[in-house]
Image: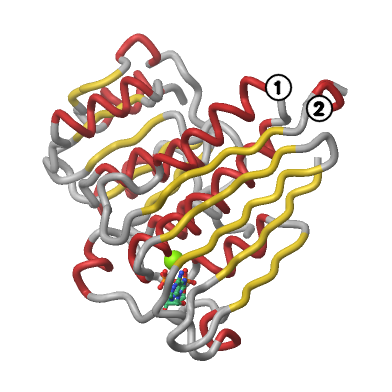
Amino acid sequence: MTTEKIRPLVLEYTIVSGDFAGGGKAASDVKRCLSQLGCQSEVIRRVAVATYEAEMNMIIHSFGGKITIYISSDNIRILCEDTGPGIPDIELAMQEGYSTASDKIREMGFGAGMGLPNMKNCSDFFCIDSGEGQGTKVEMVINL
Amino acid sequence: MDLREIKELLKCKVLANDDKLDMQVDCICASELMSSVLTCSGNNKLLVTGLNNLQVIRTAEMSDIPAVIFVQNRKPSAEIVELAKEKEIVVMYTKYSLFTVCGMLYQAGLRSGQDDN
Ligand SMILES: Nc1ncnc2c1ncn2[C@@H]1O[C@H](COP(=O)(O)OP(=O)(O)O)[C@@H](O)[C@H]1O
Ligand SMILES: [Mg+2]
């Protein structure tokens, strides 16, 4: 398998709150890297979609933060950390269709309340840690 | 059906990657919700949308969608076309509405890529 040749690699991206036009730059770069490493296209698609949804959430809902991607020979770990305002009710936020996005965001094609469920569906391991007034931390692992 | 046939059927104008019109299309993803498009798996998809922003191309890129049609004369900006060129995504636009485009494509035998999700 080509993936066995992958050496540990870390990618880091700074995500700026409100930077709608820049949304997808991190996911796009991850996608390009994984393609160059020769990963399977289905794995690349799952990582790209999960990273993109996380990136858009940070742009739309957070004060900004950082996405770090750890690539090893076993898996790809996506760590998303932002500085708030946090999610008061995680169970509610995880429900498909739940969104606090504004009409302006909805007009741009986001705010369907499907991002977190999409991220969970794309990953083999999904964990979210947040609370009102604190930052949000999402960790996702996709096995190779 | 290939992209060239679809282009003719819908009287589209091609703005990016007109050298890739030989591509076969197997299913259609028609949506204004980018998260919904992102759940669409399968190959040789065509995205039909009434939205008009950079995230349409980003969404297509992440979902491995090789072609996008903007409906109702919503001609995408130069910035959108530039990104599509860079990502090798075919971009076209048509005067027809989303409803009419979907009807015409359905009549031509194409189906949704999302019904069995
Ligand atoms: N990084 C984040 N910071 C604060 N709130 C968030 C964050 N990510 C998600 N949320 C909250 O969870 C809700 C659901 O997120 P999601 O499923 O991605 O749907 P959407 O982004 O379409 O609203 C959001 O509307 C928002 O209230
Ligand atoms: Mg979201």
* The label number, if any, that marks residue A76 in the structure image: none
- Front in this rendered view, residue A30 or B97: A30
Callouts 2 and 1 close, C-beta under 8 Å: yes
Q: Amino acid at mark 2?
A: Thr
Residue A114, x across and y down, in percent: 49, 68
Residue extending farthest top: B19
**Disc 2 to disc 1, C-alpha distance:** 7 Å
Secondary structure, mark 2, is helix
Secondary structure, mark 1, is loop
- Front in this rendered view, residue A31 or A118: A31
- The tag earlier along the polypeptide, 2 or 1, is 2
Q: Is residue A50 above or below residue A36?
A: below
Instruction: Give the letter of the chain under mark 2.
Output: A
Going by the image, does A53 lie left or right of B75? right
* The label number, if any, that marks residue A38 in the structure image: 1
Asked which quadrant contains residue A64, the reply is: bottom left
Q: Label 1: how many residues lie within 10 Å, few (<14), some (14-19) or many (20+)?
A: some
- Front in this rendered view, residue B45 or A131: A131
Residue A38, x across and y down, in percent: 71, 22
Q: Is residue A35 above or below residue A58?
A: above
Which residue is at 32% across, 75% downward? A101
Residue B57, x across and y down, in percent: 34, 38
Which residue is at 58% across, 48% downward? A68
Do circles 2 and 1 both sit on a common chain? yes
Instruction: Give the letter of the chain under mark 1.
Output: A
Which residue is at 13% across, 36% downward? B75
Q: Is residue B32 above or below residue A35?
A: below
Disc 2: residue Cβ within 8 A of ligand 1's nearest atom: no
Which residue is tagged 2? A3
Could you tell me how many numbered marks the image carries? 2
Q: Amino acid at mark 1?
A: Gly
